[in-house]
Amino acid sequence: MGVRGLQGFVGSSCPHVCTAVNFKELAERHRSEHPGCTPTVVVDAMCCLRYWYTPDSWICGGQWREYFSSLREFVKTFTTAGIKLIFFFDGMVEQNKRDEWVKRRLKNNREIARIFHYVKSHKEQPGRNMFFIPSGLAIFTRFALKTLGQETLCSLQEADYEVASYGLQNHCLGILGEDTDYLIYNTCPYFSISELCLESLDTIMLCREKLCQSLGLSLCDLPLLACLLGNDIIPEGMFESFRYKCLSSYTSVRENFDKKGNIILAVADHISKVLHLHQGEKKLEEMLPLGPNRALFYKGVASYILPGQKSPWFFQKPKGVVTLNKQVVSMCTDPDSNQKLLIGTDSEFNLEAPMCTDPDSKQEVLICTDPESTQEASICTHPEIKQEDPMDTEPEIKQQVTMVSDPEILKYLADPGFKPKPLMLYKTTAVFPAGPEVRWHVERQHAVRNQLRLNFGQVARAHHVQAESYLVYNVLSSGEVECGNSLEDALDRTLPGQAQVYRPVRQRVYSLLLGGSQGDASTCPTVKEWFVYSGNPLRHPDLVRPLQMNIPGGTPSLKLLWLSTEPGIQVRRLDALLACFDLSSLKEELQALESPFQALCCLLIYLFVQVDALCLEDLHAFIAQALCLQEKSTAQLMDLQVLTLDHVDPRAVQLGSLLVRGLTTLVLVNSACGFPWTAADFMPWNLFDGKLFHQKYLQSEKGHAVAVLVEQNRSRLTTFHTLKSIVCKACVKEDRPVVSRRHWRAHHSGGRPPIPAPCSFSAKNAKKRLNWEEETKLRF
């Protein structure tokens, strides 16, 4: 994360860059210098997750109440000091950073494999040096902070840019995070979360001015240095030979510095002594070996330029200098090449302005620096990277022409004055076996449908920015979603990964979001999924086709689900939610339950129908831990030591992650359906505790009575049997009886159920879903 090698360089070679500070003192000084202005710290939440998660146990699925308590203490400490906190979360993975995202996910896979190897070998949780954050931590942290009354925002691009912009524009006290990119941005001061002592509010401030003094550079040179060293946009190997060339000609090599430290000094020396000589006279490509990577390099440098700032490294013709609100910085002197860098900070800038930095490679550079600017334009930053349209993945498939029946679309088609906006979220490139009039009609239908998506996209965008939804805006804006790693054992073939288990739910959500008012999945574009699961090399996204929904009374439109206030609309929203899990027939049974057990039963029924590797003992453990959790305090849960249990079971570890990922799926479904349930209904601190589940799992595996599982509480025992009955009856209706593992052991050797490869999906459900390999996992 951040600039390659810079963190180590600052820590070992430039310790004076780090200054000890105290937030209380800084806040008091800020109030005296800015009367009436509340000291505000912008928090890069993604950098802080591992520092916020203080519970000792992390492998069992998460200690969510303990974590919530930790967050509450964090917020309370700053609030008591009179400091306001603004939290930012990553909401998008930018295309130019996708390779880096994939690289980290694959690295995480290796770390998870080592974790499971350790658990199997030692039957205990590894030490903190192997710590891996629980599944869903980032998603549920947003809701925890909002519950605590904190302003929580989700980014429309890389969060660090929005954090730096917010800090600069709002004159904030500083940025709290752990990313060396904040040393590069010319913004408010940068403070380290890893060095924060919460009790005293002491931490370390990393001073970019002192860094510049050590390197002999100015602040505007730091973006250039960052790109030459390598960052999340520029691969580290791109300028490796250039860096070594700088090192070989560097005459002030310091013996007390390591090799990486001397490389940073050498590159900085080259910038100050060589590049500065021709600054403003020559283009960067004339001074650096950019080759075919010019556009990518310029985008990397420009990604550090905040609204209202300019870079002297962009060779500017006098006529090309305009205000940054609509800035087009020319990067060459050839008037015919149309080589321009568009840095948009105004919602009204013209997206059709030339953005190509190379007339041959058509390398476009578009940097949107204002949340109001349009985000849907394609960005091609490398000649070998072809940006595919979501509909342009199977050009040889001849799409059958269907008559328009969507009333929302018919209304627009009847208007002869309708002119769709030029910017479309999806566009059809299918080959239609029909004449030009029919083809025009169908293309017009797609245009209207896309226009409606744009309108609903604004609603989705608002929920996204306010951190109230999950993935909905991503589906509508780009047709591309991602999900990181979960604690799943790649060597255990008895349990499918969460990405596979919950995919049918997501497919129905895609149908709801993209299928028009009638939810017609046949006309929906595919959605690109970057989901981590065993055997997926992440070279390309999976192209996932939406699944047709079956909702009593028909599929309601997004306009109805999201905007209607008519009586009974919550019933329609709940119908849509249950249909996403294919549980419409169980509406009455689920509605009879109290919160939060509606959500729990919804997930358990779906899981046990979907995955035939789950047994009665698993069901007992899931229900018992949820019931016991309701009456346990945070202190009691903290006193429950997982180390006092017989052992840590790797299967229970994966089951814990599977349930929590189901809760994140509920966040997606609930937001897509117009929020029929309140967020509290499916927050993990109300439904799941990792250590408690592990305890119940081991007890259930040993054959303990249900009364023991519910800790001899009669009220819990009654509720237990009610919940178990609902789940088991629902499974029987789907020809999937939930049986005891002892039943398996009596009929099969090895103690585990017979599992069809490659995934243990229910046989009946396999027929109801699209085939995993042939239908839902298409490849480029």
Image (cartoon, rainbow, N blue to C red):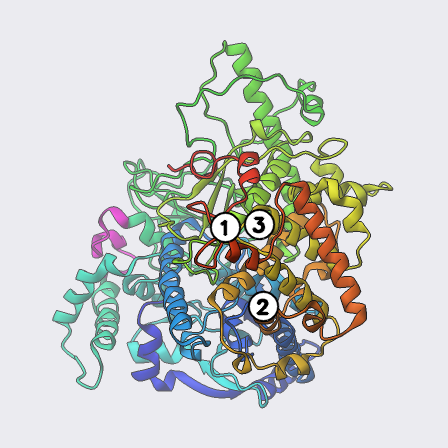
- The nearer-to-camera label among 2 and 1 is 2
Sequence-wise, the earlier of marks 1 and 3 is: 3
Dot 2 or dot 3: first in sequence order is 3
Which is nearer the N-term, disc 2 or disc 1? 1
Choose mark 1 or mark 3, whichever is in front. 1
The answer to whether residue 95 is above or below residue 453 is: below
Is 286 magenta? The answer is yes
Give the residue type that dot 1 points to. Ala
Q: CA distance from mark 2 to mark 1?
A: 23 Å
Residue at 80 percent across and 45 percent down: it is: 588
Residue 17 locus on image (x, y percent):
38, 83
Does the stretch in magenta take in 513? Answer: no
- Judge whether residue 535 can be spotted in this image: yes
Q: Which residue is mark 3?
A: 471
Element at badge 1?
helix
Please state the extent of the stretch shown in magenta in the rendering. 278-293
Q: Quadrant of residue 630?
A: bottom right
Left or right of 220: which side holds 438? right
Q: Which residue is mark 1?
A: 499
From the viewer's perspective, is 440 left or right of 452? Answer: left
Q: What residue did someone put label 2 on?
A: 697
Instruction: Answer few, some or many: residues within 10 Å of disc 3's Cα (few below 14, many 20 plus, some between 14 and 19).
Output: many
> Which quarter shows the N terminus?
bottom left
Q: Residue at x 34, y 79 (%)?
A: 10
- Give residue 212's position: percent from left, percent from top: 35, 76
Q: Residue 655: where, in percent of width, then height?
A: 54, 61
Select label 2 or label 3 by which is in front.
2
Q: How far is the residue under mark 2 from the one under mark 3?
A: 32 Å
111 is higher (above) or lower (below) than 358: below
- Name the side, left or right, on which 126 lies relative to 670: left
Q: Of the residues shown, which amino acid type is indicated by label 2? A: Tyr
